Image: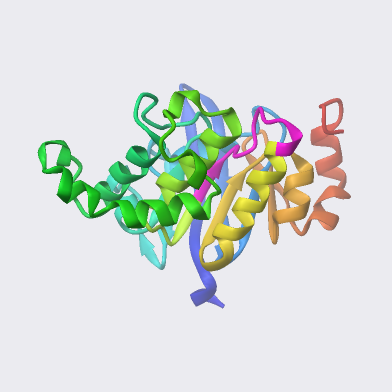
Amino acid sequence: MAEDIILETRGLRKEFKGFVAVSDVSLKVRRGRIHALIGPNGAGKTTCFNLLTHFLTPTRGQIFYNGRQITGSSPAAIARLGLVRSFQISAVFPHLTVLENVRIALQRKRGRSFDFWRTDRSLRDLNSRARELLDAVGLSAFEGSIAVELPYGRKRALEIATTLALDPEMMLLDEPTAGMAHADVERIAALIRRVAANRTVLMVEHNLGVVENLSDHITVLSRGEIIAEGDYRSVSGHPEVIKAYLGSEHA
């Protein structure tokens, strides 16, 4: 039903000087699901993410969030509506502590991005919620650690904590397990499942094991176009999907 659709695109297209990166993509993401966007390298997945959050402007097409057209809105305005993205490259303040990173994200949520000159007491008031978020992502033991010193998998967990600090209704996760060792992949996959318990997640992910275990629905892109949709079993056996991945590391 229409009310179950939290995010929708209609005929979304992006061209770069004649090169079509995303071609007439019509996507529907249902509320409360983990929806994966997959495809071989160069398929247009990250470009699609950039369009959804307006870090890129569509050449044409429309984007709707909770039934409201957000085409042309600024990234900040889209985030305030509850659609928040975490980036493929970890985006934290490297020389601040883990707790300070989450506390800054909480300041942004309440509209005070520049609380640095406020009293320590005022900032300490945010510590309780920050510690709740760190506990949720398994970083309680690291709150005093400098972010740059964290192992890679823990940095990604911190990024998810700072995203959660904005209290998103829907999270866009771009390659959440990229470059991780097996143990970190399992930890982040379990974390995504936990944080998706009361929100919608759309993720770009190359690790098909993660996609299979986490996703309720999958959209497959190839050369900027949707070639298949459905659950993992149906899309993994689709002839066009097999052809798109042929010769790749996932074939």
Instruction: Write the residue at 67% across / 48% down.
Output: 189
**Vertical side of 67 occupied by 130: above or below:** above
Q: Quadrant of residue 196?
A: bottom right
Q: Quadrant of the N terminus?
A: bottom right
Residue 226 falls inside the magenta stretch: no
Q: Residue furthest top?
A: 17
**Vertical side of 210 occupied by 217: above or below:** below
Instruction: Write the residue at 34% across / 51% down.
Output: 79
Query: Where residue 184 sits in the image (x, y, percent)?
Result: 68, 37
Of residue 143 and residue 248, the one placed in the foreground of this image is 143
Instruction: Write the residue at 64% across / 37% down.
Output: 177
**Vertical side of 44 occupied by 121: above or below:** below
Q: Which of the colour schemes (rainbow, by chain, secondary structure, one colour) is used?
A: rainbow
Tally the marks. 0
Left-right relation of 7 to 116 = right
Left-right relation of 133 to 129 = right
Q: Quadrant of the C terminus?
A: top right
Query: Where residue 35 sits in the image (x, y, percent)?
Result: 63, 56
Of residue 48 and residue 94, the one placed in the foreground of this image is 94
Of residue 37 and residue 60, the one placed in the foreground of this image is 37
Instruction: Write the residue at 66% across / 40% down.
Output: 205
* Any part of residue 226 in sight: no
Specify the segment rendered in magenta. Answer: 172-183
**Vertical side of 167 occupied by 151: above or below:** above
Query: Where residue 69 sits in the image (x, y, percent)?
Result: 36, 59
Of residue 72 and residue 148, the one placed in the foreground of this image is 148
* Any part of residue 149 in sight: yes
